Image (spheres, rainbow, N blue to C red):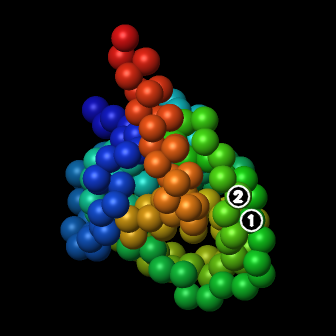
Amino acid sequence: MLNLVIYPDPVLDKVCTEVTIFNDHLKSISQEMFALMYKSNGIGLAAPQVGLTDRIFVMDVDNKKRVVINPKIVKETGLGGIEEGCLSFPGIRVKVDRSMFIDVEYYDESGALVKEKLSGLEAICFQHELDHLNGKTFIDILSSTTKSFIAKKLERQKREQRT
Ligand code: CO
């Protein structure tokens, strides 16, 4: 059973490593990640958010499920952005600048190379999850004062949930 990692946690800062073995274990991990993502009402979930450090994330925007492994953005245009949420930051929303059109390459869970053009929410979600694989979260654009305020708020929430 995978559990959701809530900020602050050192695993969220880890740069993840390339996946080299495409096997049944990888498939079952991705299925468990989908299950946890749906249970948490998210549209994307990346490996560090479940305590893993492999370059894999799952996403489901507009009922299009994707298992994304070793992702790359090969071209990006069009500056935009929305207020984003993140399952590792319950209740926090941050407006982030993103590219609105991206050409991407990644491998699916069976090891097949996928090339796609994404736009809008799909493009935003892909960039948000790819940042996680590089140890970055959506609050990295904020000042250190705001970040420590958010950290304290989430730690307080965690403590209150336990009691
Ligand atoms: Co996130």
Residue type, mark 1 in image: Gly
From the viewer's side, name the closer residue of 99 and 123: 99
Q: Secondary structure at mark 1?
A: loop
Between 15 and 65, the one lying in front of the other is: 15
Q: Secondary structure at mark 2?
A: strand
Q: Position of residue 145 (x, y in %)?
A: 52, 54
Residue depicted at 57% across the width and 66% down the height: 141
Q: Is residue 162 visible?
A: yes
Using the image, determine if residue 115 lies above or below residue 160: below
Per the image, the residue denoted by label 1 is 81
Instruction: Say if mark 2 contacts mark 1, CB within 8 Å.
Output: yes
Q: Is residue 60 above or below residue 159?
A: below
Quarter of the image where the N terminus is located: top left
Name the residue at 31% across, 69% down.
Answer: 15
Quadrant where the image shows the C terminus: top left
Label 2 sits on what residue type? Lys
Q: Nearer the viewer, mark 2 or mark 1?
A: 2
- Asked if residue 115 is positioned above or below residue 129 in the image, the reply reads below
Specify the label residue 95 is tagged with.
2
Give the x, y percent position of residue 16: 30, 67
Callout 2: 10 Å neighbours few (<14), some, many (20+)?
some
